[in-house]
Image (cartoon, grey):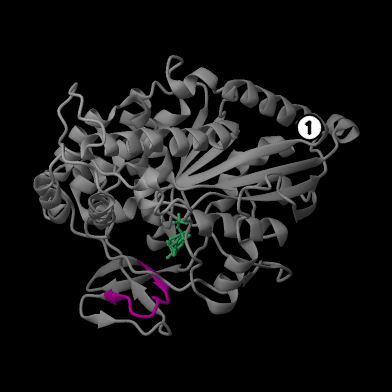
């Protein structure tokens, strides 16, 4: 029935699409990668005719009008664009990050670039932007794993030397419970809370790990506290049947429920309907946390990209009729680096994806890699240091940010030399070979900038226009 419904949905999407062309653009990335800022900046630049020289339709003056419209899905929260842009422009603060799925429809009326197209095309494209946590994509591999395998893998990871201290409370609790004792809710809650707390602690700046399923333990959306989220991995023996009503049997059942009522519906109802995808990656956070974080990010990206090309015989592959045809992987916050380093940043992302692409047997979709800043909070300069000229970035660090001994007050403009990314990305993956940590601080969002002609005020960015051109440009030609 699920599959029949999906085919029907796709059919109606497609047929209404004939009369009113639509493009469903997925925006994802792990938490704090920059999804909210990206969507807010993209929408603001389109609504207000921002400076987008590499976005052909806009540069060629062919966009007649862009506006927000009622989104097609009534049951999905709306992306809070107005609130987010107000926070950036009026409060000069960063907006609240993505916690769950949300959606926004932006419609563009345009003039076709070719005479032929001008005569026939309706000149209207609705872009349904779908924002969702990348953590949720990391759940797909769970569908192929039973509770025993999931538990064994999770426990093995929790016991790694680099993680053991973060997982202490959870591991102690696991050691103290009796798997065959009758299940009680207090124990189930304590276990799941301790396990979730351990996963959360792996996401802090100093650890910055990425591969931490189940995704809803990090980003519960509106499911926090529900039974399908109240479980934790247990040292159960593979193949053994635990007594009915025992703790092990109870949590195994909830794990299965998690897959059925949480994971599958997301992939079926939302993921499977996307046409294009941008995957945002905060590479710098991983680099600064060290080689383990970089390797872990590589694994997470491979798992995420694997979702876009599932095997035919898998659950997702069996009903995915609509194929994503373009994927952009973007390193965000490039304004934290001088332009000279952007190529290196892109090189690092390519290196991170090499393996993913090989493993996912990635073909069919056009894939591109880009370093961007959806909102550019800095400008570039150079300073003389001894006889040397150092490329620096200049911005206003947010209140409370620190570099070394210095704490910033949120009002003072400062020049910062962020450091050099290594020319050879391989160094970032090897313990002991990693470069010195980079100097990154959170900057305050910038003010609107006037374009060269002094006519429009827009949010400064780096390569947001290239991203737009890749993701939607061909649909406006
Ligand atoms: P999300 O969890 O993926 O929605 O992440 P956000 O979009 O909320 O971004 C997380 C944080 O990263 C923000 O609060 C900003 O501090 C920072 N950030 C995101 N994008 C940019 C950018 O383009 N430039 C700068 N300077 N900081 C950014």
Q: Where is residue 330 in the image (x, y as percent from the top left)?
A: 45, 45
Element on which disc 1 rests: helix
In the image, what residue occupies the spot 12% across and 43% down? 160
Q: Is residue 426 left or right of residue 173?
A: right
Number of labels in the image equals: 1
> Closer to the camera, 66 or 470?
66
Ligand 1's quadrant is bottom left
Q: Which residue of the protein is positioned furthest toward the right in this rendering?
A: 119
For disc 1, the marked residue is 16
> Closer to the camera, 241 or 12?
241
Q: Is residue 458 above or below residue 22?
A: below
In the image, what residue occupies the spot 15% across and 42% down? 430
Q: Position of residue 103 (x, y in %)?
A: 62, 49
Q: Where is residue 225 in the image (x, y as percent from the top left)?
A: 39, 54
In the image, what residue occupies the spot 67% across and 27% down? 10
Q: In this view, does 54 lie to the left or right of 461?
A: right
The N terminus: image quadrant: top right
In the image, what residue occupies the spot 47% across and 29% down? 308
Q: Position of residue 294 (x, y in %)?
A: 25, 45
Locate residue 360: give its quadrant.
Answer: top left
- Residue 352 in view in this figure: no
Locate residue 402: give its quadrant.
Answer: bottom left
Q: Is residue 424 magenta?
A: no
**Magenta-highlighted residues:** 392-402
The C terminus: image quadrant: top right
């Amino acid at each position: 029935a699920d599959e029949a419904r999906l085919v029907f949905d796709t059919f109606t999407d497609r047929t209404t699409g004939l009369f009113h062309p639509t493009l469903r653009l997925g925006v994802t990335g792990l938490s704090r990668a920059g999804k909210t800022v990206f969507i807010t900046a993209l929408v603001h630049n389109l609504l207000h005719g921002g400076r987008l020289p590499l976005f052909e339709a806009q540069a060629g003056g062919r966009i007649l009008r862009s506006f927000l419209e009622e989104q097609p899905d009534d049951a999905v929260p709306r992306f809070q664009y107005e609130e987010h842009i107000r926070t950036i422009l009026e409060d000069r603060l960063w907006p609240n990050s993505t916690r769950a799925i949300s959606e926004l429809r932006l419609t563009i009326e345009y003039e076709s670039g070719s005479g032929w197209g001008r005569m026939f095309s309706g000149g209207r494209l609705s872009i349904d932007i779908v924002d969702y946590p990348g953590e949720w994509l990391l759940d797909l591999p769970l569908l192929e794993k039973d509770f025993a395998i999931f538990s064994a893998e999770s426990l093995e990871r929790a016991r790694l030397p680099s993680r053991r201290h973060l997982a202490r409370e959870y591991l102690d609790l696991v050691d103290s419970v009796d798997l065959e004792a009758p299940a009680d809710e207090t124990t189930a809650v304590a276990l799941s809370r301790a396990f979730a707390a351990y996963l959360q602690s792996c996401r802090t700046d100093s650890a910055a790990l990425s591969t931490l399923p189940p995704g809803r333990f990090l980003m519960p959306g509106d499911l926090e506290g529900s039974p399908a989220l109240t479980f934790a991995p247990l040292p159960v023996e593979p193949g053994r049947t635990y007594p009915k009503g025992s703790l092990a049997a109870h949590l195994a059942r909830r794990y299965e429920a998690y897959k059925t009522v949480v994971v599958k519906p997301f992939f079926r109802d939302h993921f499977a309907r996307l046409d294009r995808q941008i995957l945002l990656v905060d590479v710098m956070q991983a680099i600064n946390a060290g080689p383990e974080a970089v390797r872990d990010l590589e694994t997470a990206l491979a798992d995420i990209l694997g979702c876009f090309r599932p095997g035919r015989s898998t659950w997702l592959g069996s009903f995915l009729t609509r194929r994503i045809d373009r994927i952009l992987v973007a390193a965000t916050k490039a304004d934290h680096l001088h332009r000279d380093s952007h190529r290196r940043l892109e090189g690092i992302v390519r290196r991170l994806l090499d393996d993913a692409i090989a493993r996912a047997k990635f073909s069919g979709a056009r894939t591109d890699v880009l370093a961007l800043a959806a909102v550019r909070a800095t400008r570039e300069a150079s300073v003389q240091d001894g006889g040397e000229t150092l490329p620096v970035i200049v911005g206003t660090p947010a209140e409370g940010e620190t570099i070394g001994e210095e704490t910033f007050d949120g009002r003072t403009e400062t020049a910062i030399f962020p450091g050099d990314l290594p020319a050879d990305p391989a160094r970032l993956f090897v313990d002991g070979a990693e470069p010195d940590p980079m100097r990154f601080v959170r900057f305050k969002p910038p003010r609107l900038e006037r374009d060269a002609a002094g006519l429009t005020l827009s949010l400064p960015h780096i390569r947001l226009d290239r991203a737009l051109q890749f993701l939607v440009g061909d649909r406006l030609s």
